[in-house]
Amino acid sequence: MKFVLASHNKGKLEELQSILGELGVEVVLQSEVGLNLEPEENGTTFAENARIKAEAVMKASGLPAIADDSGLCVDALQGGPGVYSARYGGEGLSYGAKNRLLLQNMQGQMPRTCHFACHITCCFPNGDVLDAEGTCQGTVAFVPMGEGGFGFDPVFFVPSLKKTFAQLTAEEKNVISHRGNALRTFAQELKTYLEK
């Protein structure tokens, strides 16, 4: 069975393929089925944005489509940037600049607790929908640390490992990350669905 990932992100595709490949499922980028969609993510929750993307790509391709939406939720910032993580500080701002802005906004703020959240939605042409969520708890570091990862990874500190996401290997990160947790839950749901 072929699924389309409602994304242009090859890193996300590799994560999906490694976890869903065991189910005998083929996952391709939307560009591989001739699509270049950028649906407007105007939802107010991660679930709404994931659904918008998955539904648009499913309707355009006629194939089951998988989308995710994720972000950093900081307690001292009332859960922000949250669903607006990608647009934090304005469109076109680099993640280096976003991280500096976050640290600036966190000056003097306590506690520094936060979590990454991820919501995955899969829409099928027959109208069926699967949803899965994952989170990872951490704190906002005082300075960026590490060269790996992307986004807010250099400032997302995992106290139990005494490292930021950017200091972890991809394998270490996948074991505990919000997306890894959501993908494992999704894989179980999809397995059950496909066995029906």
Image (cartoon, rainbow, N blue to C red):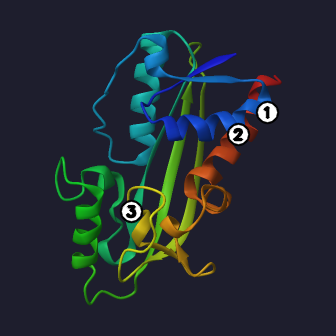
Disc assigned to residue 152 = 3
Q: Left or right: where does residue 131 sit relative to residue 58?
A: right
- The local secondary structure at tag 3 comes to loop
Q: Quadrant of the C terminus?
A: top right
- The image shows residue 30, relative to residue 157, as above or below, that is above
Q: Position of residue 97 (x, y in %)?
A: 22, 63
Seen at 49% across and 35% down, the residue is 10
Which residue position holds label 2?
Answer: 19
Q: Position of residue 70 (x, y in %)?
A: 44, 50
Residue 131 appears in the figure: no
Q: Residues within 10 Å of mark 1 (few under 14, many from 20)?
A: few
Which residue position holds label 1?
Answer: 22
Q: Residue 95 is drawn in which quadrant? A: bottom left
Q: Left or right: where does residue 133 sit relative to residue 88?
A: right
Farthest-out residue, right: 195
CB contact under 8 Å: marks 1 and 2: yes
- The image shows residue 29, relative to residue 158, as above or below, that is above
Q: Position of residue 127 (x, y in %)?
A: 56, 18
Which label's residue is closer to the chain start, 1 or 3? Answer: 1
Seen at 57% across and 82% down, the residue is 162
Q: Residue 156 is drawn in which quadrant? A: bottom left
**Amino acid type at mark 2:** Ile
Q: Residues within 10 Å of mark 2 (few under 14, many from 20)?
A: some
Give the CA separation, mark 1 to mark 3: 30 Å
**Amino acid type at mark 1:** Glu
Q: Left or right: where does residue 154 sit relative to residue 77?
A: right
Seen at 55% across and 34% down, the residue is 13
